[in-house]
Image (spheres, rainbow, N blue to C red):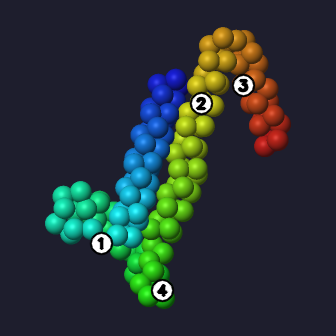
């Protein structure tokens, strides 16, 4: 149980790191788009290549408004913040809860056994 909790915790941390990295890339691309960047600059090419797979579908749904103002980076930032809060943090919290339960079961084996027996009695009584 502790091994599974550690794996989930690691997955949550890696997902959070990846989403944070992508958040920074989107932010830098938005800032650079305000100036006239050199399209042959390797950094600009990397930013465009790494953020276009996410921005293009959003740009198809919501086209630029009033003079070419593109809302897709803002919407992508909101989606990433949501994924960080909903998905990555949920994995981390669930892993920590599993770890606490496993540590409680190891620390108090009779208490965990009593909880399990009480739960099984409730289930048996309820479903009979």
Question: Badge 4: how crowded within 10 Å, few (<14), some, or many (20+)?
Answer: few
| CB contact under 8 Å: marks 3 and 1 | no
Kindly identify which residue carries mark 2.
96
First of labels 3, 4 by sequence position: 4
64 to the left or right of 89 = left
| CB contact under 8 Å: marks 4 and 2 | no
Q: At 52% from the left edge and 30% from the top edge, which residue is drawn? A: 5
Residue sitting nearer the eye, 100 or 76: 76
**From what the image shows, is residue 58 above or below residue 127?**
below
Question: Which disc, if any, is residue 9?
Answer: none
Kindly identify which residue carries mark 4.
65
Q: CA distance from mark 2 to mark 1?
A: 47 Å
Question: Which disc, if any, is residue 116?
Answer: 3
Q: At 77% from the left edge and 37% from the top edge, which residue is drawn? A: 123
Question: Which disc, if any, is residue 36?
Answer: 1
Seen from this angle, which residue lies furthest left?
40
Residue 19 screen position, x and y as percent: 44, 50
First of labels 2, 1 by sequence position: 1
First of labels 4, 1 by sequence position: 1
The answer to whether any part of residue 56 appears in the image is: yes
**From what the image shows, is residue 114 above or below residue 50?**
above
| CB contact under 8 Å: marks 2 and 3 | no
Q: CA distance from mark 3 to mark 4?
A: 59 Å
Q: CA distance from mark 4 to mark 1?
A: 19 Å
**From what the image shows, is residue 46 above or below residue 98?**
below
Q: How many marks?
A: 4
Q: Nearer the viewer, mark 4 or mark 2?
A: 4
Q: Nearer the viewer, mark 2 or mark 1?
A: 1
Q: Nearer the viewer, mark 2 or mark 3?
A: 2
Question: Badge 3: how crowded within 10 Å, few (<14), some, or many (20+)?
Answer: few
Q: Secondary structure at mark 4?
A: loop
């Amino acid at each position: 149980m502790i091994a599974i909790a550690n794996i989930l915790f690691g997955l949550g941390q890696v997902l959070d790191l990846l989403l944070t990295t992508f958040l920074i890339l989107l932010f830098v691309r938005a800032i650079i788009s305000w100036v006239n960047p050199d399209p042959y600059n390797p950094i600009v090419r990397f930013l465009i290549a790494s953020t276009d797979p996410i921005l293009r579908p959003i740009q198809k749904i919501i086209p630029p408004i009033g003079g070419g103002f593109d809302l897709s980076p803002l919407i992508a930032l909101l989606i990433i913040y949501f994924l960080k809060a909903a998905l990555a943090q949920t994995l981390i919290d669930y892993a920590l809860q599993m770890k606490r339960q496993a540590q409680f079961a190891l620390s108090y084996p009779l208490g965990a056994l009593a909880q399990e027996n009480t739960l099984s009695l409730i289930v048996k009584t309820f479903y009979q």
